[in-house]
Amino acid sequence: MDESTEVFDLETRRRVLLAVPPSVHEVLARIEAQSGRAVQFLDAHRLKASGIENPGLDASLVNEFGAFVTVENGDAIDANAVTHELLHVHRYVVEGVPQMDAALDVGHDVELMASIDNVLEHLIIVPREKEHGFNPDPHWSAQLIQTFTRNDYRSADHKRAGYLLGWTVTSYCTDQHARAVGLEALQSLGIQREARLLRDSLWKARTSKERMVKTALAALGISEQRAILVRYDIRQGSKDVRPL
């Protein structure tokens, strides 16, 4: 890491480093060695108090300007949550995996592509959390149930997409009750076979981000022309954008 790199929030960074295990310190070190810049840990409460939205749809953001992780900096740092976000960042910065983005800023496409990208990345990073001593199963069991019991889907197509993507969680979540809730919901739409096929196809394709993206878009009936793959080079301050 470049010693001249400014750390925006030293106190939040200090608390993060105290909370996460040594193996996660190594993940952070690899990210910063590759990018030449400090990962910026930002206090979510301070951002909200300033009227600034979180930097990204989730709690982490990687672009040509740097890597940012938003931390719910309450009484105690959630070490598992921070580790989860750093594993996202590691994929993009160290492993050079492209991010899926919307080709055009129209309708819900930016949100949609970011959501799909997040789902695809979870197939790789959630199992890795266990390598750092965490048990992500309770969180994802709750998420699985929420996906299949929520009643705020915008349309039938939105619900179908949510169910198909939601079932991919069963690649790494084995909770039988949560799976039963999901299966019943899939059966109510008659898409249990589609959901299993998408989950299994994505799992087999997980070594290639491009294949994963194409597989997901095809299953959801979304044109490949609506998506792009973007790689950011923080050290060079540049980005590489490619169509599918």
Image (spheres, grey):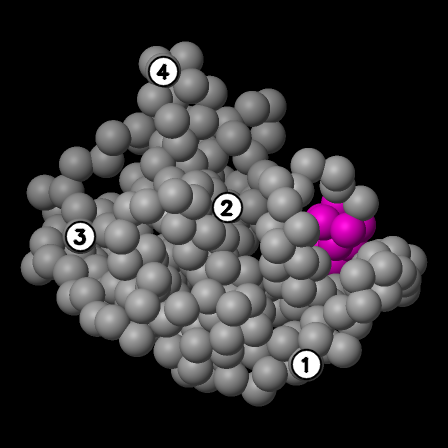
Residue at the farthest front position:
156
The residue tagged 3 is 64
Examine the residues drawn in magenta and state their main secondary structure. helix
Residue extent of the magenta highlight: 137-148
3 left or right, relative to 136:
left
Closest to the camera, between mark 1 and mark 4, is: 1
Location of residue 39 with respect to 215 vertically, above or below: above
Q: Please name whichever residue, 46 or 151, is drawn nearer the observer in this view of the structure.
A: 151
Task: Give, as a three-letter code, the residue at label 3.
Answer: Glu
If you read the primary sequence from the N terminus, does the residue marked by circle 4 or circle 2 appear first? 4
240 left or right, relative to 223:
left
- Label 1 and label 2: CA atoms lie apart by 31 Å
If you read the primary sequence from the N terminus, does the residue marked by circle 1 or circle 3 appear first? 3
Considering the numbered disc 3 on the image, is that residue within a helix, a strand or a loop?
loop
- Tag on residue 82? 2
- Label 1 and label 3: CA atoms lie apart by 36 Å
The crowd level at tag 4 (other Cα within 10 Å; few <14, some 14-19, many 20+) is: few
Whether residue 139 appears in magenta in the rendering, the answer is yes
Location of residue 28 with respect to 153 vertically, above or below: below
Marks 1/3 in contact by CB < 8 Å: the verdict is no
